[in-house]
Amino acid sequence: MPQPIEFFFDFSSPYGYLASRKIDEIGARYGREVLWKPILLGAVFKLTGSQPLVQVPMKSDYVARDFARFARLLGVEFKMPENFPFSSIHAVRSFWWAEGQNPKLAHDLGQHLLNTAFSGKDIASAHAVAAAATEIGIDSAALLAGIESQEVKDRTRRESDAAIARGIFGSPYIVIDGEPFWGADRLHQVEKWLEAGGW
Amino acid sequence: MPQPIEFFFDFSSPYGYLASRKIDEIGARYGREVLWKPILLGAVFKLTGSQPLVQVPMKSDYVARDFARFARLLGVEFKMPENFPFSSIHAVRSFWWAEGQNPKLAHDLGQHLLNTAFSGKDIASAHAVAAAATEIGIDSAALLAGIESQEVKDRTRRESDAAIARGIFGSPYIVIDGEPFWGADRLHQVEKWLEAGGW
């Protein structure tokens, strides 16, 4: 069995959202499972001295144009959340809470939260995350209790620390058999790598 | 006649070098001239708070691996200069000096200086730039005098200011009919844009 593809993303990352809409079908095309792993870029940005692209002088106009243009190219819906960038801590905790019960459920929740955020809606608060989760049949009271548990907080911290220790510094960040690819604009290289087994 | 493609790059940018090896053939495929425009990213980085990727914690290892991997994918030679990042002021001035005489000569000098730098050799000093220029038949004494002239210094400053005023913040940065594309990993989008006339 080939190793799964690891798909690291931040819920507040437009490029992470764009990649999320394609990575599963790319994996399926090459017989690979895709493991979704949400990260908290805020912690990474402190280490790298980075800031969200939309806040960087000169780059902000470019990326706003590019998000929409890239989405059109991929054929996916895209609308920036009014509140941006937003804290994704509740979204990440809800993902790891769901993952503790059922990895498939966590995946579906992850995709739904990204889709919700980049259809322009809020997923920053625990309440907003829970409201979105009910739309795919998740019990909101269970989710709200779950993300406050120490177990889920610890899991979130552990996954975040592990990603940083492995040098994951951006979103999306895709790892195939140990080979890292950073950025939505590398999806075609990801495909080539899967097809050719490297170059 | 279609508008020329504008190709902005920094002589000290590995991704700029990689794009330089492909942009002319992409332009030719779609009947477009390519105007090469070297910029000084140092001035931009002061405005954007950026720093060279090779100096950013966590990112430096990734980009070192990626430069070489990307070069293999494009099928071009690649070796990092020992001294990196280096000042490209003399390279840029020599480009605009040559351009004042003959745009084709400037293009060829630009490509040769990039090829020299990313075959691992020094092009930081005026002497090193002149030595490389003689390899394509340019008179080194004329170049050394030219890049010290006020006219060439002014032209360099004017081009740099104009690029910044237009929001050019990275290397490579490619503009097609007003549409900007940042990064060597956008070459396939550049091709698609040229082929389809936008999307």
Image: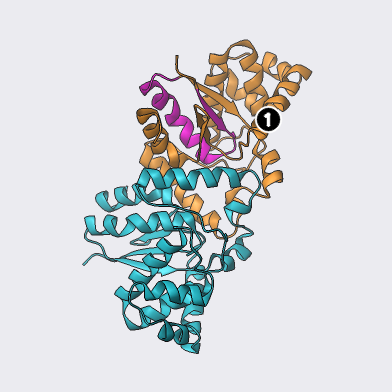
Chain colours: A cyan, B orange
Q: Mark 1 sits on what residue?
A: B160
Helix, strand, or loop for circle 1? helix
Q: Nearer the viewer, residue B97 or A74?
A: A74
Judge left or right: residue A79 versus residue B148.
left
Rendered position, B9 above or below A167 = above
The answer to whether any part of residue A145 appears in the image is: yes
What amino acid is at disc 1? Ser
Residue B144 magenta: no
How many other residues sit within 10 Å of disc 1, few (<14), some (14-19) or many (≥20)?
Answer: many
Q: Where is residue B150 drawn, in percent x and y?
A: 78, 19
Q: Position of residue B154 (x, y in %)?
A: 75, 22
Chain of the residue where label 1 is placed in the rendered structure:
B
Q: Is residue A23 left or right of residue A164?
A: left
Q: Position of residue A100 (x, y in %)?
A: 37, 82
Q: Residue furthest top?
A: B101
B12 part of magenta stretch = yes
Q: Quadrant of residue A73?
A: top left
Give residue B100's position: percent from left, percent from top.
Answer: 65, 13
Q: Residue at 58% across / 26% down in the picture?
A: B37
Looking at the image, is B62 positioned above or below residue B131? below
Instruction: Work out which quarter of the rendered image holds the C terminus of chain B and state it.
Output: top left
In the rendered structure, which segment of residues is drawn in magenta? B5-32
The residue located at (58%, 52%) in the rendering is: A53
